[in-house]
C-alpha cells in the first residue's frame, strides 16, 4: 500500500502491438478473459500535460483489461495522438507504464501532488471516473501512478470483469465490453 496514493490494484502495460501481448497473457500466463474497451473513449474533458485537448483525441489504438486475482492487468496500445503512452513507446520502452490506485480523496491528493510540484501527464473525466497520471517516474526511474476516483458504474464493471476471471475456463480469451 502506498501511504501517498493508496493501495495499488492495477498494473498497466503500454505496448506497441496489443495482439501479441493478449496472446502472451492469455496463452502463456493463463490470465483472462481480457475485455476490450470500446474506442474512442467518451471523455467529459481531457488534459495532456496541462493543456485541454479534444474529447475524441486518438490517444488509444486499443485497450484491454483482465484480472489475475484482485490485480487488474491493463494493456494499452497508443494511438497516433501525442500522449504519455505514445511518448513511452517512441522512447523504445515497453512494459509497466503506470500502477493504478482507487481514491475517495481525489481533490485532496491532487492538491498534494501540485503542492509537491509533481507533474501531471494526463488528467480527465469519463462518465465512470475522474483520473490523473502523476509523473512519479520523473522523480525516480520507474512508473507513473494513476489516481482513479471511480463512480459506482466503474466499480460494478470492474467487479464483473474480476468475476469473469474467477470463472474463466480458457475459452473466448478476448471479449468486447
Image: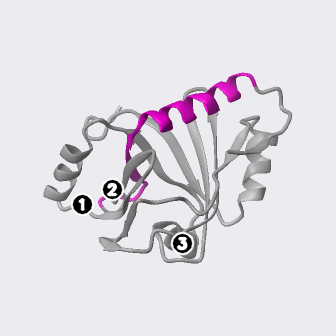
Of marks 2 and 3, which one's residue comes earlier in the chain? 3
Asked if the residue under mark 2 is in contact with the one under mark 1, i.e. CB atoms within 8 Å, the reply is yes
Q: Is residue 130 above or below residue 153?
A: below
Tell me, yes or no, if residue 115 can be seen here.
Answer: yes
Is label 2 in a helix, a strand or a loop? helix
Give how far apart the Cα atoms at labels 3 and 1 are: 20 Å
> Can you name the residue that lies furthest to the top here?
167
Q: Tell me whether the residue at label 2 lies in contact with that at label 3, contact meaning CB atoms closer than 8 angstroms.
A: no
Colour pattern of the rendering: one colour
Left or right: 46 in relation to 173 = left
Q: Is residue 146 above or below residue 166?
A: below
Residue farthest along the left direction in this orientation:
115
Q: Is residue 146 visible?
A: no
Judged left or right of residue 55, residue 36 is right
Q: Which residue is mark 2?
A: 136
Q: In this figure, which residue is indicated by the disc labeled 3?
A: 86
Measured Cα–Cα span from mark 1 to mark 2: 7 Å
* Residue matched to label 1: 118
Please identify the quarter of the rendering in which residue 108 is found: top left
Q: Does residue 76 appear left or right of residue 43 in this picture?
A: right
Q: Residue 73 placed where, x, y %?
A: 60, 42
- The magenta span reads 139-167
Q: Secondary structure at mark 1?
A: loop
Amino acid at each position: 500500500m502506498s501511504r501517498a496514493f493508496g493501495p495499488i490494484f492495477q498494473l498497466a502495460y503500454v505496448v506497441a502491438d496489443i495482439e501479441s501481448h493478449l496472446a502472451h497473457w492469455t496463452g502463456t500466463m493463463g490470465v483472462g478473459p481480457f475485455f476490450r474497451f470500446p474506442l474512442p473513449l467518451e471523455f467529459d474533458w481531457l488534459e495532456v500535460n496541462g493543456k485541454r485537448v479534444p474529447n475524441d483525441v486518438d490517444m488509444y489504438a486499443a485497450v484491454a483489461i483482465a484480472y489475475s486475482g484482485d490485480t487488474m492487468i491493463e494493456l494499452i496500445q497508443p494511438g497516433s495522438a501525442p500522449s504519455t503512452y505514445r511518448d513511452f513507446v517512441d522512447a523504445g520502452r515497453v512494459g509497466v507504464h503506470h500502477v493504478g490506485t482507487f481514491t475517495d480523496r481525489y481533490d485532496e491528493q491532487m492538491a498534494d501532488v501540485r503542492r509537491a510540484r509533481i507533474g501531471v501527464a494526463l488528467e480527465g473525466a469519463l462518465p465512470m471516473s475522474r483520473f490523473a497520471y502523476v509523473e512519479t517516474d520523473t522523480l525516480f526511474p520507474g512508473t507513473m501512478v494513476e489516481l482513479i476516483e471511480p463512480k459506482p458504474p466503474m466499480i460494478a464493471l470492474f467487479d464483473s470483469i474480476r468475476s469473469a476471471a474467477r470463472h474463466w475456463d480458457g475459452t473466448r480469451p478476448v471479449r468486447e465490453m
